[in-house]
Amino acid sequence: MRRAVLLVALLLLSACGSSQGDTSGSTSGSTTDPTVSTEPVSSSPTTATTITPPTTAATTTTAFDPTLELLSLTQARQRWADTNPGLYEWTYFMVCECFSGPWKMLIDNGQVLSVDSGDAPETEPPPFATVESLFGEIERVLEEGRFPVRVNYDEVNGVPSVYVFNEPDLPVDGGFIFELEHFEPNPVVEIEYPEPCSTDGSEATLVEQDLPEVVAETRQAIFDAAMSCDFDALRVLSMVGLPDWTFQTSFGGSGVELFWEEEARGEPILQEVVNHFNQPVWVSDDGEFHVWPSAFQTLEAADGTGMDPDAYAQLLELYTVDELQDMIDFAQGYVGWRTTITADGVWTVFIAGD
């Protein structure tokens, strides 16, 4: 199967193209975590990868009727629901203008535990993080109905094994080929956590704040896990909001694995978690989001304009004025590390940047 698809793909290398979207994000009703943008937003992010098709519909010899493909998708999703192991490892590659991947990912109940990007740049997120996100993308394209697709699904677990987008105009109008290389349910997983971690020897204590009980409990649990270098506990805490919220540590789709990966590189990210949870908190008007530090919503200038003087003084314990000025110049606001807990105690992000 792989040889056949690759043979087709090699004929397309000089002509076809695709546009791949972000894999990061989460959904919870109609609310949006304000932590991922310096501007308040009202629309829901999506948990599924979006591959944006060309703006001009393909010219096909016959009209594409998605009815049968939608039925096949529904049946495949049911097989997946019946057999979903929760923990699985999958490897796939993409072919269009060039070969991408293979991406190898370890997934635990929708949460990405690890990503091996193969030959792709480490900064390039995988086109699809989970089987569910691939299902979502296929459904979106089929419901839109403008572009022909062909999908083969595993007869037992429903996982897409081949997904060909925009056939037969693949060479000229934004088509691509997805091919599953490996799928393993319930793999034996051994994650080597770094020892020691950046909070070893720290005597930091958590500053008391006036918070709803469930928010305070989650904050305390995260703080305790970070202080004790308990990566397993952090992983469990990051999964509380699934499937409505997918915990995010970067705009490229990274999850909780960032903590042990960065610590292994010598980056004190657990100390950053501890430090930022001791900053003043900002609460959204509806009480849905609690964000640390409050500077994310209040800092207007590097000199502390817009902030309470005490809150600004605490911020300067973590960032220099020059660092704050760089943020203002880049994004017109604070874009350092920040973290969010929802009103129902779900930890949604620990993220930096814009």
Image (cartoon, helix red, strand yellow):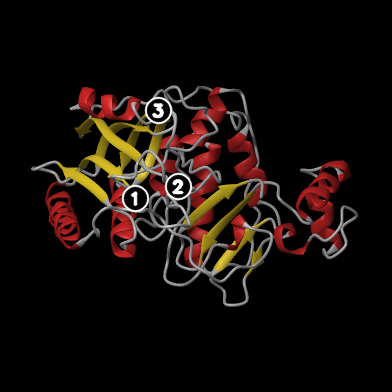
Q: Tell me whether circle 2 and circle 1 mark residues in contact (CB < 8 Å).
A: yes
For the question of whether residue 316 can be seen, the reply is: no
Crowd class of label 2 (few under 14; some 14 to 19; many from 20; radius 10 Å): many
The x, y position of residue 292, in whole percent, is 65, 56
Quote the CA–CA distance across marks 2 and 1: 8 Å
Identify the image quadrant of residue 289. bottom right
**Mark 1 residue type:** Ser
Q: Write down the residue under mark 2.
A: 23
Circle 1 packing at 10 Å, graded few (<14), some (14-19), many (20+), is some
Is 345 placed above or below 76 here? below
Q: Residue furthest front?
A: 61
- Which circle's residue, 2 or 3, is located before the other in the chain? 2
Residue 101: which disc? 3
Disc 3: CA contacts within 10 A as few (<14), some (14-19) or many (>=20)? many
Query: Which residue position holds label 1?
Result: 133
Give the CA distance from mark 3 to mark 1: 17 Å
What is the quadrant of residue 168 in the picture?
Answer: top left
Q: Secondary structure at mark 1?
A: helix
- Looking at marks 3 and 1 on the same chain, the residue that comes earlier in the sequence is marked by 3
Residue 3 spot, x, y in % from top left: 22, 22
Residue 84 x/y as whole percent:
18, 46
Outermost residue toward the right in this view: 303
Label 2 element class: loop
Kind of residue sitting beneath label 3: Gly
The structure residue drawn at horizontal position 27% and vertical position 24%, both measured from the top left corner, is: 7
* Cα gap from disc 2 to disc 3, whole angstroms: 15 Å
Most foreground residue, 324 or 5: 5
